Amino acid sequence: MVQTASHPAGAANSSSATPSVSIPPGSVGIVQPQIIQFDEPLQLTSGQTLPQYQLAVETYGTLNEDRSNAVLICHALNASHHVAGISADNPRDVGWWDNMVGPGKAVDTDRFFVIGVNNLGSCFGSTGPASINPATGKPWGAAFPVLTVEDWVRAQARVADYFGIDCFAAVMGGSLGGMQALSWSITCPDRLRHCVVIASTPRLSAQNIGFNEVARRAIINDPQFHGGDYYEHGVVPAHGLSVARMIGHITYLSDETMAERFGRQQREPGQGGSYHYGYDVEFEVESYLRYQGEKFSRYFDANTYLLITRALDYFDPARSYDGDLARAMEPAGADFLLVSFTTDWRFPPERSREIVRALLKNKSPVTYAEIDAPHGHDAFLLEDSRYHAIVQGYFDRIATSLGLRERSHTTGVLA
């Protein structure tokens, strides 16, 4: 396997702060991604083969001598390798899980070497539909292979090989990232000691598949989609992608959060508080969703959205075992932490409990926490003291088992 990177293997790719950027306490600082090139073909679940590819990666902390302190963070649908810290290219671009990962934080980069990988098919530096197909010299577009969660795990395992990591201290993710962590425990059971699955599910419900399909139809039916080859036309199916994001965003929030944030408030009520009786933006929630959709359409790729939502649909490790999740998870040898949130109706607590029951049936070590939080599915991204304390406590146990240095739980300073 021929591999090249813009930074040396095993080195953290966070850089020193510049005087113009204020680095908050607990931040890993200013970070730059590294690009790792893989020239060995990757066999995909679909039967297709990706002849070569690159993955964008960020690392935080220092890999210890025996390479036992590595933690892989798997991202959700619209996130990336930029897990923590401040982007060197944009000081306002803070990592999507910066409140979780950093010095003294729940996943403490003073003790752990944390890796974030942008998944294949994504649009943030890894090979995807907008990349050049070496066979044609043109963007892959609609010809890019359909991917599965298992394909991402195989690609991530090659990243581990690149850094010389035989076994992760933990593989961790929320939502779709949690699916990847779960898949790691089954497909690569000897390569992780702990599996941390947050706000996730062993498979999508029919309702969830339905939401994904409506979002995909919005994109595919956009006149600018051009069968997925819109790159050649120099256009973007922005309207369809915007609607898709609006649909998805509704499912990430709880009814309680939406009611508290927007209620039935109108932007500009008519005289006496009356309605305008039209179809332009009138309610605050409409304005918010349109803003989120339009912003999303400016930075995300439509083909990537199609690929990732289909990978969500396909994930079902129990499918080959007549729906028996316990049988599907028999290979898993890791210890598990699962966390769910009471108001998450996208991936409700019952789905996490289903995983817990399967693990208990297999007598696998498992810790489960159900957090009473009002924020819906997005709660896994937010800073809830109870949630973060559970994760921190679990990673403290991992650190102790590995003989890593202790820290002060009040200050985060290493003892």
Image (cartoon, rainbow, N blue to C red):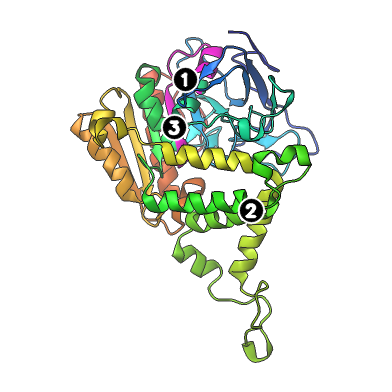
Tell me the residue at 55%/38% (across/down).
Answer: 307
Place residue 305 in its image quadrant.
top right
Residue carrying label 1: 69
- Residue 385: numbered disc: none
Distance from Cα at disc 3 to Cα at disc 2: 27 Å
Give the amino acid type for the residue marked by disc 3 in the picture.
Answer: Gln
Q: Nearer the viewer, mark 3 or mark 1?
A: 3
Place residue 115 in its image quadrant.
top right
Give the amino acid type for the residue marked by disc 1 in the picture.
Answer: Asn
Give the amino acid type for the residue marked by disc 2 in the picture.
Answer: Gly
Residue projecting furthest to the bottom: 272
Residue carrying label 3: 180
Q: Earlier in the sequence, mark 3 or mark 2?
A: 3
Q: Earlier in the sequence, mark 3 or mark 1?
A: 1
Residue 306 in the image, given as x and y percentages of width and height? 56, 42
Q: Nearer the viewer, mark 1 or mark 2?
A: 2
Neighbor class of circle 3 (other Cα within 10 Å; few <14, some 14-19, many 20+) is: many
Residue 146 in the image, given as x and y percentages of width and height? 53, 32
Distance from Cα at disc 1 to Cα at disc 2: 43 Å
Q: Nearer the viewer, mark 3 or mark 2?
A: 2
Tell me the residue at 45%/25% (across/down).
Answer: 45
Q: How many marks?
A: 3
The relative height of residue 40 versus residue 133 in the rendered view (above or below) is above
SS class, disc 2: helix
Q: Are marks 1 and 2 in contact (CB under 8 Å)?
A: no
Q: Earlier in the sequence, mark 1 or mark 2?
A: 1
Q: Are marks 3 and 1 in contact (CB under 8 Å)?
A: no
Q: Nearer the viewer, residue 53 or 236?
A: 236
Query: What span is colored magenta in the figure?
Result: 156-177
